[in-house]
Image: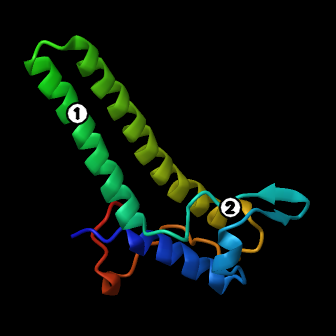
Amino acid sequence: MIDLDLCSETLAIIANLNGISRDQLDREESVEGENFLWKNNYKISLQKNVTTNISYLISAFKLANDAIDNGDKLTAMMGLALAHSEAKRLENIFAGIQEDSLRMLKIDGRFNWPPIPEKYEIPEKYNFQGRR
């Protein structure tokens, strides 16, 4: 099983290591005169949120499919519209992860990262299996 909560938990840990509490992640804050709102919702389970939205997405496509089987173009169209809405919700969830990660990497000066050396490779001891 894929543990999506690891994403939000890791972002919260990284924030905490840089002096930003979980409470701060859940509200708008002013940094250097700019107002920022963290995009990810750190109060709820990312796993549950994504799973619920995928379930609704599948239900919407099932509705459209059943309506097509019954020659009901209007309900098929509504199923497609609902699927579009659920897909957008999923897109926004992952966009939030992307935006919060970018903020931690480049935008928010409270995060101090070492420079990446030329030709850096992730050490083998981490057994990283993702794209590089």
Quadrant of res 128: bottom left
Image point (31%, 71%), residue name: 3
Q: How many marks?
A: 2
Secondary structure category for the residue under label 1: helix
* Label 2 CA crowd tier, 10 Å (few <14, some 14–19, many 20+): few
| Residue position marked by numbered label 1 in the rendering | 61
Q: How far across and down, in percent of the image, does residue 125 sit?
A: 32, 87
Image point (72%, 60%), residue name: 107
Identity, as a three-letter code, of the amino acid under mark 2: Lys
| Residue position marked by numbered label 2 in the rendering | 106
Rendered position, 132 above or below 59: below
Image point (48%, 68%), residue name: 44
- Is 26 placed left or right of 119 in the picture? right
Tag 2 and tag 1, C-beta contact below 8 Å: no
CA–CA distance in space, label 2 to label 1: 39 Å
Say how the picture is coloured.
rainbow
Quadrant of res 7: bottom left
Q: How far across and down, in percent of the image, does residue 10 sit?
A: 49, 77
Secondary structure category for the residue under label 2: helix
Which of 108 and 13 lies nearest the eye of the viewer?
13
Tag nearer the camera, 2 or 1: 1
Rendered position, 39 above or below 23: above
Quadrant of res 16: bottom right
Identity, as a three-letter code, of the amino acid under mark 1: Phe
Rendered position, 66 above or below 56: above
Q: Quadrant of the C terminus?
A: bottom left
Image point (26%, 68%), residue name: 2
